[in-house]
Amino acid sequence: ERVEAHLDIASGSNIDTIAARHLELGATLDHRDESWITLRDPAGLPYCLVGRAPSAGG
């Protein structure tokens, strides 16, 4: 089944710490870029941690 959408989780300057915690909890690294990290949850579905501050919205 093809995934048509995924979550972007605003992580601010804590992106590396948050990514490390997600990896500890079973996520796998899919791709890393300058301002975002794409992970896959234990079921294999993709989601992104982005460097935007959570309070920035949109």
Image (cartoon, rainbow, N blue to C red):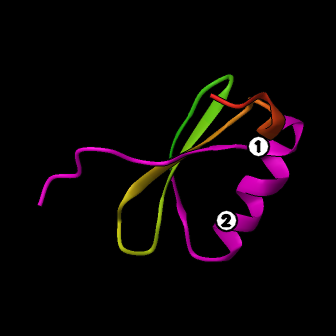
User: What element does badge 1 sit on?
Assistant: loop
User: What element does badge 2 sit on?
Assistant: helix
Task: Give coordinates of residue 19: x percent, y percent.
Answer: 71, 54
In-front residue for pair 45/5: 5
Task: Name which residue lies at 84% across and 54% down.
Answer: 17
Task: Name which residue lies at 67% across and 22% down.
Answer: 34
Task: Give coordinates of residue 3: x percent, y percent.
Answer: 23, 51
Q: Is residue 43 magenta?
A: no
Q: Which residue is mark 1?
A: 11
Provide the residue span drawn in magenta: 1-29
Quarter the N terminus occupies: bottom left
Residue 22, label in figure: 2
Quarter the C terminus occupies: top right
Task: Give coordinates of residue 46: x percent, y percent.
Answer: 40, 53
Which quarter of the figure has residue 8? top right
**Crowdedness near tag 1: few (<14), some (14–19) or many (≥20) residues, C-alpha within 10 Å:** many
- Residue found farthest to the right: 13
Which quarter of the figure has residue 37? top right
